[in-house]
Structures are given as C-alpha cells and as structure tokens.
Amino acid sequence: MTQPYPGPNRGPWPYPVPYQPLPYQPPPRYRPLRKVAIVSIVLMGLTALAAVIQSVLLWRSYDDVKRLVYGLLSEEEIDRGVESISGTGPLLNLVSYLLMGTGIAFLIWLWQARENTDFLHSPFAPRPAIPADPMRGPHRRATGWVVGAWFCPIVQFWYPFQIVQDVTRASEPTGEGRPRSGRVRALLYSWWATWTAFWVILVGGGAVAVIGFIVWFVRLIQVSESSDASSPYVDIYDMQDFMVRVALGVDIGFTVATVLLIVAAVAASLLMLQVTGWQHTRAMPPPIQDLPRPVGPPQYAPRYHRPGPNFPTYGP
C-alpha cells in the first residue's frame, strides 16, 4: 500500500519524476587541415626570410655602430645613418608581425588537429581507435591548454610540447599510442629544442642589451661627474669598448637565433604535414573490397508449382 509523500501537491509515493533531458552535445567532426597547414608553413617561411634579412642588415651596420661609438662619424654621416635606420624600421618590425601571424595560424591548426583526434577516437570515425588509457583518453592536458600553455609562465617550457606530442601520437595510424617512427620523434624534439632556444636567446639577449645600455649610461654620468673640471677631455675609452662588445653580442645572438628559427620552422612544417596526412588518411572511409565472383554459370532458386487458376508453372 502506497503512502502519501509529504509535501504540497504531491500524490502517493512513488510519484512520477518529470523527464529532464540531458544537454545536447554535438558529436565530434573532422575538419580538413591542409589549408591551415599551408598558410602556417608559408608564414613560417616568410618569418625566417625576414629574420635573415634583418640579420644581414645588423652585420652591415656594425662598422657604422663602431664608428658612432668612438665618435668617428661626421654630422652628415650621422644624418644618413638616422635616415637609414628610420627607413629600415618597418622592415625590421616585419619580423615581429610575421612571427605573431605565424603563431596565430599555428594555434588554429593545433586546435583543429586536437579536435580531429577526438573524432578519430570516437565511434563516429570510419576507423575508431582505442587509446592506450581509455579512462584518461589520448591527451594529458585539457583542451584549454592548447592556447593557454603558450602564455602561462613556467609551464610554457614543457606543456606545449606535451600537447603537440599527444596530438601526434593520437593521429598516427598505428594506434599503439606512441610514434614508432624515429623520424617523427626527431622532428618533435628538434622543433621544440630549437624553438625554446630561439626564445631564450631573443628575450635574454634583448634584456642583456638593455641592461648593458643602462650600465653604460650610468657609468658615463659617473665619469663625467668625477672628472676634473679644468680638463676638457673625459676618458671614456673603456666604456666605448664596452658598448662595441654589446653591439657585437647583439649581432651574434640574433644570428644564432635566426639559425634556430629556420631549423624550428623546417621541423614544424614537416611535422604539420605528417600529422595532417595521417589524420586525412584515418578520416577517410576504408576502401570497399571487391567480392569474389562465383565460378561457373549462375544458379537460380527453383520455383515450385502452386495450384490455382492462371498461375504460371515452370518445369515438368
């Protein structure tokens, strides 16, 4: 015998529970990556080319920088140098703009490649794959880290590499959870090592150059204040040598960073093409195998006589 459930407007227990549908989640789908990969690779090439041009310009202006530091330039040469610097400024800034555009295109490709791996490991894929750890899935980091890992301090030194490595593993047709090809592993590690070293040299070298200029300026003020007021000359030869060494270090550092950028661009381009090809192959339905054809004349099922008017009969 059912008992009434306490509460307003409630019937006898068990009372019917209203149906609450679960929120709709669209199934994962595959997005072709070829166009995004080509755009990203082209931007990588343009960035490397602009960095090479900037490195050449730095080395060509090194002698003029030395003469400027030692005070060997005339006013006319200084004016020409200022005009040359102002004219090449947009060209030098082009590296920063291209580097920013390359990063945006690469992140778009990486985000779509990550979503494609979710499709490849779902029942909707033509050839669904089972990850090595079904409880965790093929990825060690959440989807939001695809973008946030590049900007979060400290973890930006290994989270992006793990994300790209997981996408590569989940895209490989072997389905064993790790890349078997030594070539793919070499591309992964060479790309990340050169890319990290490029940023360390670029940011660290820029900070050293700024600190060197500040130190030089402070020492120049100290020397001028401590010099003899009756003497018209101030001994700043050591400080001039210091600034020349800083300028040489900037040129060498940027040249090394340019070489690292070229290696990283080549490795990243080859890796993107490999992952794009793998995902395209796995997203396509498997080919239909031709059924074996029977040997000999075709066989037909016999028809039997059924009694009834106007019913055709075959055979005896």
Image (cartoon, rainbow, N blue to C red):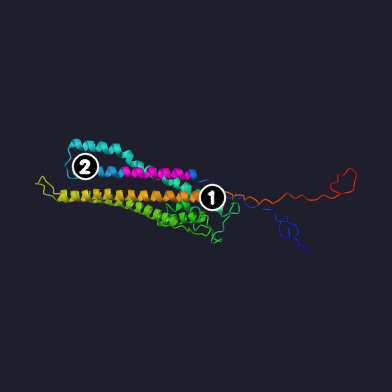
Q: Nearer the viewer, residue 149 or 8?
A: 149
Amino acid type of the residue that numbered disc 1 sits on in the rendered structure: Thr
Q: In the rendered image, which quarter is residue 71 located in?
A: top left
Against 234, residue 13 (above or below) is below
Residue 183 seen by the camera: yes
Residue 115 seen by the camera: no
Q: Which residue is mark 1?
A: 281
Residue at (56% x, 52% y) in the render: 119
x then y, percent, for residue 270: 43, 50
Per the model, the C-alpha gap separating discs 2 and 1 is 56 Å
In the figure, is residue 312 to the left or right of 180? right
Residue farthest to the front, as pictured: 296
Where disc 1 sits, the SS reads helix
Q: Which mark, residue 64? A: 2
Residue farthest to the bottom, as pictured: 1
Amino acid type of the residue that numbered disc 2 sits on in the rendered structure: Asp
Q: Nearer the viewer, residue 121 or 66?
A: 121
In the figure, is residue 170 to the left or right of 313? left
Residue neighbourhood size for the residue with mark 1, other residues' Cα within 10 Å, grouped as few (<14), some (14–19), many (≥20):
some
Q: Is residue 144 magenta?
A: no
x then y, percent, for residue 184: 44, 55
Segment colored magenta: 36-53
Label 2 or label 1, whichever comes before in sequence order = 2
Q: Are marks 2 and 1 in contact (CB under 8 Å)?
A: no
x then y, percent, for residue 96: 36, 44
Residue at (38% x, 55% y) in the render: 193
x then y, percent, for residue 205: 30, 51
